Amino acid sequence: MGKKFEYKEVDLLPVLNLMTVLIPVLLSITSYQKVGIVEVNLPERSDMVMTDEPPEPDDQALNLTVAVTSDYLQIVARGGMLPMIFYKEMWTFHCASTNKAVANDTITYEPSTLGMLADGTFSKKTPTCPSGKEATKYDIETIHLWTLNKQTEEDPGTVVFSLYSADDSAYVDGNNEFITSRNGIQPGSVLATLKESSARKINTEKYNQMKVLPRSAYDELAKALIGIHTRFIDAPDADNIIVLANDDTPFDKIVGVMDRARDAGFWKINLAKLGG
Amino acid sequence: MGMKKSRKFVKGYSGISLTSLMDAFTIILVFLIKNVDTEGNLMTQAENLRLPLTTSQKTSKEVALVVIVDAKQVLVDGSPVAETESVAKQDSLMIGSMVTVMEQKREEEKKSALARGEDPETAGNVIVQLDKNLQYDIMYKVMATCGWSGFTNIAFAAIMKNAEE
């Protein structure tokens, strides 16, 4: 009682010194872009040698194949073909401009207007950034596949639109059909995406972030593959898929197709060339 | 005596308050600790190429041979073995100069597996870092060459989209 305590400030300098050392160390080891892997199935060396006798056909097998061409995606299962998913390809080039005055650092072109040759050069028009820099094939940042509504290969078709979330997930209704506009949707509505168990009540923030965009052909493919996997879950090769593509298909598109296949449950992915 | 000295030093001197600086540093430290990958990174992205984005959340768990294919060259374990342009032009599925190097690497891998007392015939692991704008034909030839040389566990490197943690 009556004892007087003297106030003394804690000396923070040693802690501060420690932090000054720790922060640069952690900054140097922190990775902001994580490198993952995409696995593919490859036959063993012995299997790569052709034999005279073809394997016996299995009636119960799904034999699922996805063909990737420059105009459409085609799913083949049990010898039957699903309707083609036609698309219009759009290339967004990254400009990497150092000029801060140039706000938009990407440019988007339809490939047919550029006429890319086998060596990666352009015959019709060279994509040019706002800064004047000419972009090359290796500057393509994103390849968009806009779903087209068309019946035959000759029909030019029209772009189909869908409602997307802020993280570019397409919304689907209770019947697993794509939602094409905001009509009838309000904060509190229950919507799902193509991911499993994704049905959620939409809050005001998410409602305001919704956007109507050209529907990605990858989403059409994902929806069809999810349907097939659910229906043929008992097939002996229910986890297998073969991805067929043309020689000039960009690797990015192959990874896009492989991602949708794996997310749908087909995790044993084999690759083959289209047309031999 | 000491007290006297201290009082003299403090007189007329107003020290900088470090509390706000400490607060800022604490926030930065917590953020960095949260983002540090404790599993470590066995693979780093090669220069001069752009990897595709993937939804896959798998990372490489074992040390594997790395094949890099950019716009100009094909590199095995950091050494150039072929030019990408000539690979695109060739008709054969096998990249001749790459097969030689890969088979040599496979033999070395078998020997070290044997030395560790493991089965040398276990399929070899290879991770291919391929520029996302290279055509499928090149990817297929690289893949076929790896498979032929005994590296049948093939994975392609890609940047993880929405990487958790």
Image (cartoon, coloured by chain):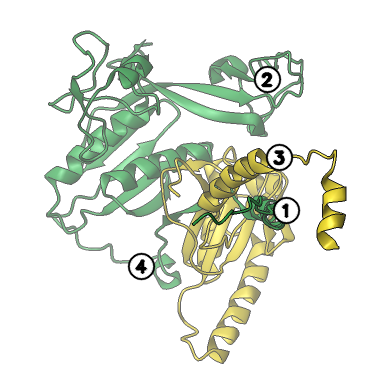
Q: Residue at x 23, y 16 (%)?
A: A187
Chain letter behind tag 3: B
Chain letter behind tag 2: A
**Inter-mark Cα distance, 3 to 2:** 65 Å
Please tell me the colour of chain A: green
Q: Residue at x 36, y 31 (%)?
A: A218
Q: Residues within 10 Å of mark 4 (few under 14, many from 20)?
A: few
**Inter-mark Cα distance, 3 to 1:** 11 Å
Q: Quadrant of residue A59?
A: bottom left
Look at discs 3 and 2 and give the one toward the viewer: 3
Look at discs 3 and 4 and give the one toward the viewer: 3
The yellow chain is B
Q: Which residue is mark 3?
A: B17
Look at discs 1 and 4 and give the one toward the viewer: 1
Q: Which residue is mark 1?
A: A13
**Inter-mark Cα distance, 2 to 4:** 44 Å
Q: Earlier in the sequence, mark 1 or mark 2?
A: 1
Check disc 4 and report its element: helix, strand or loop. Answer: loop
